[in-house]
């Protein structure tokens, strides 16, 4: 097992879905799993052999313990889970197919995680031996307390010399506690070394305008790095959607000096698109911890992302060997005997 330790922070929700690709109106039962962006990243990294730990707050009841068991069953270190209150966040997923899109309904108001407050997490202890800390733009959108806890973690990680990454994509519908992402996110991103985000994400958060530049992503990344000098790399992916079942994926990066992009990977029969961005983030973290070449890292992350489309559930439960095979061009999916 790789001795690198990655710590992630964010809400884990109960996921409820009709079986297969059924619509809610057809279902007489719902399949239950647990997932959340940052925990999905941690699970993916655990399957790649890293020591991955997730920090979250679960309700102090049987549901909270069940969710903890789910994380532990997928190789996560759950010693950093804290408990309180009685409600877990939920989301209901109706999986699309071909030309019918997937649909998600959230129920996360009043969840145990949304009531997290500064001081509840002992970041000095939890990050003491970590090599990497990862968060996403969803966490500070959930509540003022979650945003403050995330800032606490970033400040401790910076002080301890731990690499900090963030997937800064957020959802405007989540910012309901009186502050906008433009007010909150810049301070958090200022403590990051690696940023995963699109041109639109950067423009929405920092109110920059890369229009008129041939490569808007590169120009937005340059402007982000001017505002946040600690940031060393800005990474995103292109997704070409031919249908809900057929996408093409391409990774891209600006490292402050050079622009890289990968060849497209064709994903022709999507099983479950949820968590594919998290699989991409996990692939980037693994690559940046283990490879010296930025393009190799991008290819690894893009292959990880593509493979997640074939895995049911939120997290990418594929092996290092699976990703390496696809990364090096083996798209046949032969039976391994």
Image (cartoon, rainbow, N blue to C red):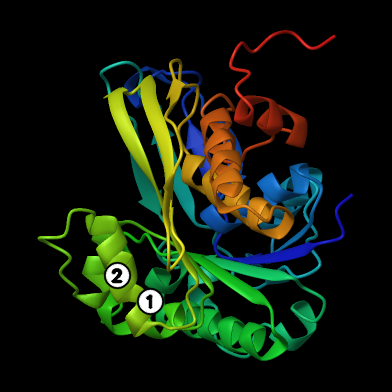
In the rendered view of the protein, which quadrant contains the C terminus? top right
Q: Position of residue 127 (x, y in %)?
A: 74, 78
Q: Position of residue 313 (x, y in %)?
A: 57, 34
Q: Could you classify mark 1 by the number of other residues whose Cα lies within 10 Å: few (under 14), some (14-19), or many (20 or more)?
A: some
Query: Is residue 77 left or right of 284 when viewed as pictured?
Result: right
Q: Quadrant of residue 240?
A: top left
Q: Could you classify mark 2 by the number of other residues whose Cα lies within 10 Å: few (under 14), some (14-19), or many (20 or more)?
A: some
Visible residue check, residue 176: no
Residue 320 numbered tag: none
Residue at figure coordinates x 53%, y 79% from the top left: 150
Residue at figure coordinates x 63%, y 18% from the top left: 330
The vertical placement of 129 against 92, above or below, is below
Which residue is nearer to you in this view: 31 or 78? 78
Q: Quadrant of residue 253?
A: bottom left
What residue is disc 2 on?
175
Query: Is residue 329 left or right of 20 when viewed as pictured?
Result: right
Q: Quadrant of residue 157?
A: bottom right
Q: Position of residue 262 (x, y in %)?
A: 46, 38
**Helix, strand, or loop for circle 2?**
loop
- State which mark lies toward you, 2 or 1: 1
Residue at figure coordinates x 50%, y 37% from the top left: 16
> Counting residues from the N terminus, which is met first, the one under dot 2 or under dot 1?
2
Which residue is nearer to you in this view: 175 or 87? 175
Q: Identify the residue at the far left of this view.
A: 212
Distance between the alpha carbons at the discs numbered 2 and 1? 25 Å
Which residue is nearer to you in this view: 235 or 38? 235
**Helix, strand, or loop for circle 1?**
helix
Visible residue check, residue 188: yes
What residue is disc 1 on?
225
Q: Position of residue 34 (x, y in %)?
A: 60, 45
């Amino acid at each position: 097992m790789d001795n690198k330790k990655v710590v992630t922070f964010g809400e884990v929700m109960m996921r409820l879905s009709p079986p297969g690709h059924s619509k809610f109106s057809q279902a007489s039962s719902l399949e239950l799993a647990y997932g959340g962006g940052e925990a999905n990243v941690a699970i993916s990294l655990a399957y790649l052999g890293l020591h991955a730990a997730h920090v979250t707050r679960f309700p102090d009841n049987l549901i909270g313990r069940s969710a903890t068991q789910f994380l532990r069953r997928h190789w996560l270190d759950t010693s950093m889970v804290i408990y309180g209150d009685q409600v877990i966040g939920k989301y209901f997923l109706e999986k699309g197919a071909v030309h019918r899109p997937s649909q998600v309904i959230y129920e996360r108001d009043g969840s145990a995680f949304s009531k997290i407050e500064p001081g509840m997490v002992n970041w000095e202890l939890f990050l003491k031996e970590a090599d990497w800390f990862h968060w996403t733009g969803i966490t500070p959108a959930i509540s003022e307390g979650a945003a403050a806890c995330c800032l606490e973690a970033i400040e401790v990680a910076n002080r301890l010399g731990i690499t900090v990454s963030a997937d800064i994509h957020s959802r405007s519908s989540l910012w309901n506690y009186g502050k906008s992402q433009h007010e909150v996110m810049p301070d958090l991103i200022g403590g990051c070394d690696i940023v995963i985000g699109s041109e639109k994400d950067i423009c929405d958060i920092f109110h920059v305008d890369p229009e008129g530049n041939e490569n808007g992503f590169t120009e937005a990344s340059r402007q982000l790095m001017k505002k946040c000098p600690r940031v060393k790399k800005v990474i995103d992916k292109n997704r070409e959607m031919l249908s809900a079942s057929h996408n093409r994926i391409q990774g891209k990066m600006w490292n402050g000096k050079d622009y890289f992009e990968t060849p497209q990977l064709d994903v022709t029969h999507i099983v479950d698109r949820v968590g594919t961005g998290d699989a991409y983030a996990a692939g980037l973290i693994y690559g940046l911890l283990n490879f010296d070449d930025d393009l190799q890292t991008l290819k690894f992350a893009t292959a990880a992302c593509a493979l997640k489309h074939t895995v049911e559930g939120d997290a990418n439960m594929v092996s290092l060997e699976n990703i390496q095979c696809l990364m090096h061009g083996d798209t046949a999916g032969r039976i391994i005997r």
